[in-house]
């Protein structure tokens, strides 16, 4: 029983690491997987909405930040490459995985 529990724990840790280790270095090219995905001024659903991404939109990911259990990606603003904005990590994947 202990071996099964230990093996389950190890597999869970490995799978969690794989699902979160999407981008290995920055900047990186990514693609939006959702439609009408809001990008914001800060990595929080309470921060100001600055625009929207659509499925298939290409983005350049500059960095990532964990906020609680959620990953947020800092990207160049699609409408103003001189500033960065934040988008929930659940909607961005590496370009080669889209």
Image (cartoon, rainbow, N blue to C red):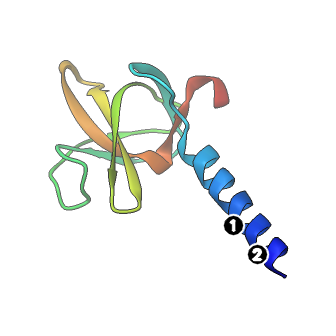
Residue 35 seen from this side: no
Q: Is residue 49 above or below residue 5?
A: above
* Image vertical order of residue 96 relative to residue 39, above or below: above
Residue 41 % position (x, y): 17, 43
Quadrant of the rendered image containing residue 46: bottom left
Q: Residue at x 68, y 62 (%)?
A: 12
Residue at the disc numbered 2: 5
**Marks 1 and 2, how far apart in space?**
6 Å
- View extreme (bottom): residue: 1
SS state under label 1: helix
Q: Nearer the viewer, residue 90 or 23?
A: 23
Q: Position of 55 compared to 81: left or right?
A: right
Quarter of the image with the N terminus in it: bottom right
Residue 81 coordinates in the image, percent (x, y) = 23, 17
- Could you tell me if residue 57 is visible in this image? yes
Q: Residue at x 15, y 51 (%)?
A: 48
Instruction: Identify whether 33 is placed above or below 95.
Output: below
The answer to whether marks 1 and 2 mark residues whose Cβ atoms lie closer than 8 Å is yes
Crowd band around label 2 with a 10 angstrom C-alpha radius: few (<14), some (14–19), many (20+): few
Q: Nearer the viewer, residue 52 or 47?
A: 47
Which image quadrant for residue 80? Answer: top left
In the rendered image, which quarter contains the C terminus?
A: top right
Q: Nearer the viewer, residue 16 or 96?
A: 16
Give the number of callouts. Answer: 2
In the rendered view, would you say 58 is above or below 20?
above
Which residue corresponds to mark 1? 9
Estimate how packed mark 1 is, as few (under 14), some (14 to 19) or many (20 or more) residues with alpha carbons within 10 Å. few
38 lies left or right of 93: left
Q: Residue 16 in the image: state x and y as whole percent.
A: 60, 54
- For the residue labelled by badge 2, is the local secondary structure a helix, a strand or a loop? helix
The location of residue 77, given as percent across then percent down, is: 26, 27
- At 24% from the left and 56% from the top, the residue drawn is 44
């Amino acid at each position: 029983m202990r071996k099964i529990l230990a093996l389950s724990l190890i597999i869970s840790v490995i799978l969690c690491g794989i699902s979160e280790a999407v981008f290995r270095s920055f900047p990186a090219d990514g693609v939006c997987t959702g439609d009408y995905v809001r990008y914001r001024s800060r990595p929080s659903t309470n921060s100001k909405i600055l625009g929207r991404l659509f499925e298939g939109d290409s983005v350049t990911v500059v960095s990532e930040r964990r906020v609680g259990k959620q990953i947020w990606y800092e990207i160049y603003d699609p409408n103003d490459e001189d500033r960065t904005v934040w988008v929930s990590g659940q909607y961005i994947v590496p370009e080669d995985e889209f």
